[in-house]
Image (cartoon, rainbow, N blue to C red):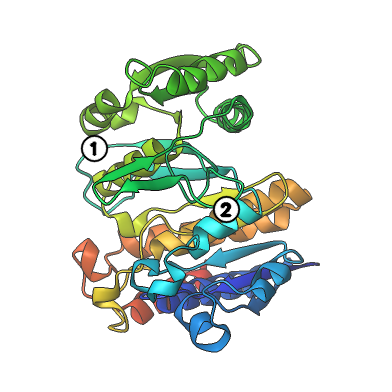
Amino acid sequence: MAAYKIGVLYGDGIGPEIVRATVEVLTAAAERTADATFEWLELPMGWTAIEKYQDPLPERTKQALEHCHGWIMGPHDAAAYPAEYQHKRNPSGELRHYFDLYANIRPIKTMEGIKSVAGEADLVIFRENTEGFYPDRNMYTGTGEFMITPDVAISTGVFTKKAAERIAHAAFRMAMKRRKKVTIVHKANVIKLANGLFLNTCREVAKHYPEVAVDDYHVDAMAAHLVRRAKDFDVIVTTNMFGDILSDLAGELVGSLGMAPSINTSDDKGMAQAAHGSAPDIAGQNIANPIGEILSAVMLLDWLAERHADQALSGIARLVETAVQKTVAEGVRTRDLGGTASTTEFTQAIVGRIKGL
């Protein structure tokens, strides 16, 4: 029986509630299968880290994560941190930069029992995660924004062939396991050099995967197509900012952003992190939807299963995924999905189904 050390970063707002729910569900699934064990390593991040270490992401946390197989990260409320921390990368941006987590993978899939504005959908968005128009990620030191005068701001965007190549390869490898179709999303008609480099590099990578059908759309058109015909898309590969926006749109189209999972990976590190934010307005009320965080952890297990050639982790992942789907289909839902279950009630319902499957 293999043992895996998993970092646990509770974060801010609803983070502690949904991360605790995720740990509880994964622990129940591991005990049910008895094929693998998890060693949970709780590490400081966010407001609790500021209070104890005067840093929202202490060096000790990053060093500890070096020795973890992967980690589960709750959302943070960096916008509300004290002014002295505003010049630094937020915790998720820092971890993506520090560990070179270049692929942000966000699946969008309809779920039985949940109303979908877009109808049926089953697609995966591959978002380049290290550069683009995100100034906290696109410089070796400092950030890519400048105030020339109090009335003039300049924000840089960085686009490299290396980054485009590796996110494109990741997207095409996924497409080979699915319906063998990749859609490249860009704005090369206006951002001709930067997005042109991204588009052309993705097309070059496509030549290595002749079985995969390839098309491309401008990002504004893609937003309309997702609303109108999300079911027609399989794997989408795009730049950092466009991927962030389109995945939030798509998540809401299939039911709720609270259901949207996400994983950030490099070649050897994986971070499960739901696509949504910290929702401080409902923090501590025990009404948050933990599905996004739980399914993010499922993605982490699948990634670890492939990396370590351990089918036991895939079995645990399928057990959790099935339990979530059955719980929702049978009418147990949190408030954002039209139900009445609290976070803890919803979590216990999933655990109960895991034990019964």
Q: Position of residue 223 (x, y in %)?
A: 26, 31
Residue at x-position 47% and y-position 45% = 144
Secondary structure under the numbered disc 2 in the rendered image: helix
Name the amino acid, label 2: Arg
Residue 73 in sight: yes
What quarter of the picture does the N terminus occupy? bottom right
Total labels: the figure holds: 2
Q: Position of residue 34 (x, y in %)?
A: 71, 71
Residue 318 in sight: no
> Which label lies toward us, 1 or 2?
2
Could you tell me how far apart the alpha carbons at marks 1 and 2 are, in whole angstroms? 33 Å
Q: Which residue is mark 1?
A: 119
Closer to us: 146 or 238? 146
Q: Is residue 83 left or right of residue 39?
A: left
Residue closest to the far front? 149
Residue at x-position 47% and y-position 68% = 74
The quarter of the picture where residue 239 lies is top left
Quick one: label 1, few (<14), some, or many (20+) residues within 10 Å?
A: some
Residue at x-position 47% and y-position 37% = 132
Quick one: label 2, few (<14), some, or many (20+) residues within 10 Å?
A: many
Secondary structure under the numbered disc 1 in the rendered image: loop
- 161, above or below 136, in the image: above
Name the amino acid, label 1: Gly
Residue at x-position 31% and y-position 27% = 219
Q: Position of residue 193 (x, y in %)?
A: 45, 18
Q: Position of residue 283 (x, y in %)?
A: 31, 79
Q: Earlier in the sequence, mark 1 or mark 2?
A: 2
Q: Are marks 1 and 2 in contact (CB under 8 Å)?
A: no
Q: Which residue is mark 2?
A: 96
The mark found on residue 61 in the picture is none
Q: Is residue 221 left or right of residue 32?
A: left
